[in-house]
Image (spheres, grey):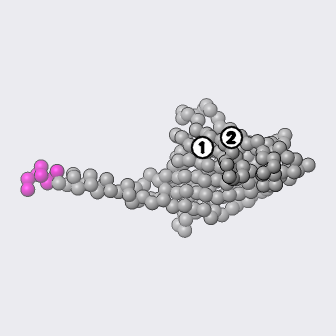
Amino acid sequence: MNRREYLAAICSTGVVATAGCSAIQSNQTLSDPTVHGDSRGRKTLVFATTDEEVGKFGVTGRVDSGVIDAPLEIWHRAGTAVKSITLRVWMPEVATESPPTVAIASPVEGDSSPPPSVALYTPDRALGTVIEISDLDDLADETISILNLLVKPVAETASKLTIHTTIELTSSGILESNYTLDGELQLTYPELDN
């Protein structure tokens, strides 16, 4: 075998081995997070495997003029990027008869990347308002703390806010898992119930 034939054989073997590697990546759902409650207005869901923390979803809310102002923070381990975020938000005491008004705010300038894509709708057969966030661009591989959830209760008796989150993470490593983080937390704002 001459040198050219040897190099061609080695190169084609390398290409075949690399082409099959994408099938090695797995998908893992983490749906039993630990809830850390620092105060009634601050809670964090911590998603972990047996080996390490994979991600955190935190909410720090306060009431301002009858509106819950709740900045969100999403942390994920190095080597992963946020593909999408889905939130379902409702107030359980009045979920069916008087759903709250829900909005999400994000700055539209100050960063080199465009703002994320946001869809907001009411699901057919589930409580609350759904917020879908995707196209995170440069924000996908860093801690996300620019999203601000705003909830205005319609009924005066509502003081509990429930947020269900589903966060899709992709891994950059060929042998690593992609993750779906799925969990729910409830915050209480007694100052709303006057």
| x, y percent for residue 158 | 84, 51
Choose between 154 and 64: the one closer to the eye.
154
Q: Which residues are magenta?
A: 1-8
Residue 66: tell me if it is visible. yes
What numbered label is drawn on residue 104?
2
Choose between 154 and 140: the one closer to the eye.
154
Disc on the earlier residue, 2 or 1: 2
**Identity, as a three-letter code, of the amino acid under mark 1:** Ile
22 left or right, relative to 38:
left
| x, y percent for residue 172 | 44, 52
Choose between 13 and 52: the one closer to the eye.
13
- Identify which residue is drawn at 85% across, 46% down: 155
**Identity, as a three-letter code, of the amino acid under mark 2:** Ile
Choose between 94 and 86: the one closer to the eye.
94
* Residue 75 lies in the magenta stretch: no
151 left or right, relative to 1:
right
* Residue 3 lies in the magenta stretch: yes
Asked if marks 2 and 1 touch (Cβ < 8 Å), the reply is yes
Q: Is residue 44 above or below residue 122?
A: below
- Identify which residue is drawn at 61% across, 31% down: 109
Distance between the alpha carbons at the discs numbered 2 and 1: 10 Å
